[in-house]
Image: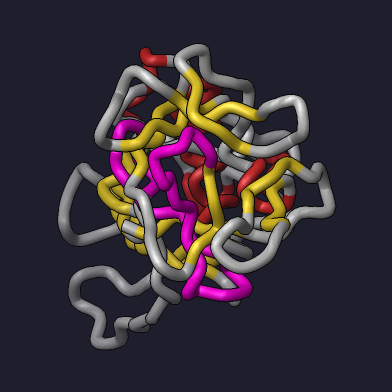
Amino acid sequence: MVFFAYAKTNQDDATWRYIIVAPNMNTLDFFWYRQLHEVKPAAELNRESPEFYTFNSNNIDLGRCTYTGHDSHEFMNKLIFTLLDDVGGRQWPPFINDEHVNRISGNTFYIRSKSDPRVFWYDKGDGKIYASQQGRTRFRIQNKNRALEREVMINSDSISISPVSNKDVEIAIDQDAGLHISSIGGEMTLGDLKSNFLSLGHGDNIRVTQNKDNGEEWELVA
């Protein structure tokens, strides 16, 4: 399922309106992240929400930014920009995206199985992380680069995952690959939730374990 967003110039309310099509929200977030940190000053492209952007049309040719030789050529064949009618137009294409979460560093989330939405990450209190249908724990997820706090997280970002009840501990990976609570923390990225963690066990003792590239997909739930 593709992901849609609107973009408009921040210079007026009458011109330069686009609809953006991306393969998924992550691709569009990465495009914005690269614009913000590598291509343009922060004021040139603003992410107002996952589905709404504003930009300085005097400094960014948004609809052609992925052309060969332009700043964002790496996103050719990954993004589509379609220019919409100006304010006097009569056509406005609506879109409906699937439910999604605004992945802002410092926000709190549940972590849920994509294949079985009844299953959540759960800290029983014994220091281990379980995959459970009976309980769930809310976690605060932060970019380890604290300079990027309150900014959108992308899959390559190193993150910390802490129970909201105790900000001084983080999820880490123990020697048998199981996830556990640690005062030291561990190394993981947001993208690890895509395929690097697997639930193993039976009954009430199903542990969440690291299994690189062979895991199941987990998603953040607001």
Image position, residue 91 (x, y; %): 30, 86
> Quick one: which residue is furthest to the bottom in this view?
90
Above or below: residue 131 compared with residue 167: below
- Which segment is the magenta one? 103-128
From this view, report whether residue 147 is shown above or below residue 6: above
Whether residue 38 is visible, yes or no, is: yes
Residue plotted at (60% across, 68% down): 203
- Residue sticking out furthest to the left: 13
In the rendered structure, the answer to whether residue 173 lies left or right of residue 105 reads right
Residue 161 drawn above or below residue 10 = above
Q: How is colour applied across the structure in the image?
A: secondary structure
**x, y percent for residue 73:** 70, 40
- Identify the residue at horizontal 45%, vertical 33% (top origin): 161
In the image, 204 versus 6, the foreground residue is 204
Location of residue 17 (image quadrant)? bottom left
170 relative to 192 in the view: left or right: left
Q: Nearer the viewer, residue 140 or 204?
A: 204
Residue 169 lies, in percent from the top left, at 40, 21
Judge whether residue 186 is colored magenta.
Answer: no
Q: Quadrant of the N terminus?
A: bottom right
Q: Nearer the viewer, residue 18 or 101?
A: 101
- Where, quadrant-wise, is the C terminus in this rendering? bottom left
Magenta stretch: includes residue 122: yes
Q: Residue at x 66, y 42 (%)?
A: 192
Residue 13 placement, left or right of 183: left
Q: Residue at x 50, y 74 (%)?
A: 117
